Image (cartoon, rainbow, N blue to C red):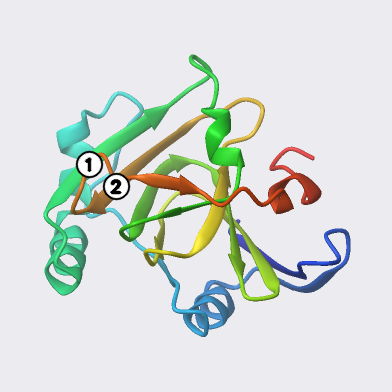
Amino acid sequence: MSCLTVYHQSTADIPNKVLTHAEDIAATLAEQGVRFEQWTAAAPLQRESSAQEMIAAYQASIDALMSERGYRHVALISVSDEPPQDTRLLAEHVRDEDEARLFVSGRGQFSLHIGEYVYVLLCEKNDLLVVPAGVAHWFDLGENPRMVAIRMGNNPQAQVRFTGEKIAQRFARLDD
């Protein structure tokens, strides 16, 4: 189940708010300019489904988002136990373009640092998250990473700029 936990940046162990209803998560994130939706695949997917089949299952929604946001690139990202997660993504960073991800399977935890608050979102199958360019965040796949996601944007090699802040180290990791 998707879950959004909101913390003040000074109290990483005491949440201000915990939300598990998609509508509440979407409304809370929308106030910060972040988009959250839950999509449904138009066709059943199997573990052995190809990248093309996975993208095709969400094609109508992907096309609508790409048209709306002006995205030109779509790709499938697949992460499993080998190799382990790129630990650089566990440090607070920003991107020069939107970070749009649709989780096809597995899970991941996006932590968004906006103003004085940290929005920790556990994303799972069918969750779409669009983090606007310039929003500080970090991403955790957990100790045993397994995730398939569809990435949409303009630059397949979008640049990551690290903020140098150590805030991510104060907050619980996905498997903590």
Q: Earlier in the sequence, mark 1 or mark 2?
A: 2
Residue annotated with mark 1: 156
Q: Position of residue 143 (x, y in %)?
A: 66, 27
Q: Residue furthest top?
A: 82
Q: Secondary structure at mark 1?
A: loop
Q: Position of residue 174 (x, y in %)?
A: 69, 42
What crowding class fits label 2: few (fewer than 14 Cα within 10 Å), some (14-19), or many (20 or more)?
A: many
Figure quadrant of residue 144: top right
Residue 33 versus residue 76: which sits nearer the camera?
33
Note whether 56 is above or below 142 in the view shown: below
Q: Which mark is residue 137?
A: none
Residue 133 versus residue 47: which sits nearer the camera?
133
Label 1 close to label 2 by CB (< 8 Å): yes
Residue annotated with mark 2: 151
Q: Position of residue 21 (x, y in %)?
A: 60, 73
174 sits left or right of 114 in the view: right
Note whether 77 is above or below 35 in the view shown: above
At a point 36% along the width and 52% down the height, the residue shown is 102
Q: Amino acid at mark 1?
A: Pro
Q: Position of residue 22 (x, y in %)?
A: 53, 72
Q: Residue furthest front?
A: 164
Mark toward the viewer: 1 or 2: 1
Q: Secondary structure at mark 2?
A: strand
Give the alpha-carbon distance from disc 1 to disc 2, as whole Å: 9 Å
At a point 52% along the width and 85% down the height, the residue shown is 31
Residue 23 versus residue 74: which sits nearer the camera?
74
14 sits left or right of 27 in the view: right
Q: Amino acid at mark 2?
A: Arg
Note whether 95 is above or below 133 in the view shown: above
Residue 19 makes an appearance in the image: no
What crowding class fits label 1: few (fewer than 14 Cα within 10 Å), some (14-19), or many (20 or more)?
A: few
